[in-house]
Image (tube, rainbow, N blue to C red):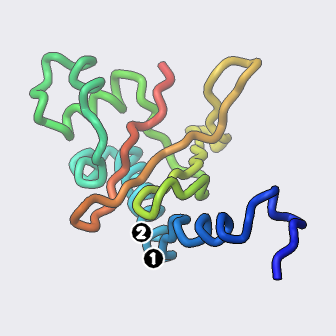
Amino acid sequence: VLDTFGTNGKMLAEIEEMIATSPVFSLDDLDRAREVLFSYLSSLHAGRYAEAVNLYGGSYDILRDWNPAVDPNDYAALFKNGCETNGLRCLEVAGVLLKEEASPHEFKFNVEFITGDGSIFVAGSETSPQSKFVFTVSKDDDGKFLVQDLPVYAP
């Protein structure tokens, strides 16, 4: 028996439908998505750009725009320039925490980074500093997890 306490005015049928249609993910998928994100960011930090390419599923358009002299299909070179010249902060990862499950095939994570002096990286203005950055990891049709975002941009 369900009374109205804690139902926010919803009928039992509405609550059952919400439960039945809510996304469900496996902990294995969550772990794999987190590992892929950590590997992607760690590869960029270490200068292993070709490895990062295999873990990235987002757009290269901004990197192509920033680097018109680079072959637009040389993704490793685009990442190299992004991290070493264009202002992407390819820093060491301090922590990766689940922010939300956007769907059964997409996870959003909060990531913190460590600077060269060992402190937590903070970007933004003094009035609105940011130390946690959101990255999305999606599972493609082949079951492979790919990061959808470039590293933090802070010129």
> Image point 28% across, 28% down: which residue?
81
Q: Which mark is residue 91?
A: none
**What amino acid is labelled 2 in the image?**
Arg
> Can the viewer see residue 9 in this picture?
yes
Camera-side residue of 136 and 125? 136
Residue closest to the far bottom:
1
Reading the image, the residue beneath label 2 is 32
Vertical arrangement, residue 52 with respect to residue 39, above or below? above
**What amino acid is labelled 1 in the image?**
Asp
Image coords of residue 28 (percent x, y): 45, 76
Camera-side residue of 71 and 57? 57
1 and 2 marks in contact (CB < 8 Å): yes
Image coords of residue 62 (percent x, y): 30, 24
Name the image quarter holding residue 73.
top left
Reading the image, the residue beneath label 1 is 28
Camera-side residue of 144 and 125? 144
> Image point 28% across, 67% down: which residue?
143
Image coords of residue 17 (percent x, y): 59, 68
Image quadrant where one finds the N terminus: bottom right
Vertical arrangement, residue 60 with respect to residue 42, above or below? above
Vertical arrangement, residue 151 with respect to residue 42, above or below? above
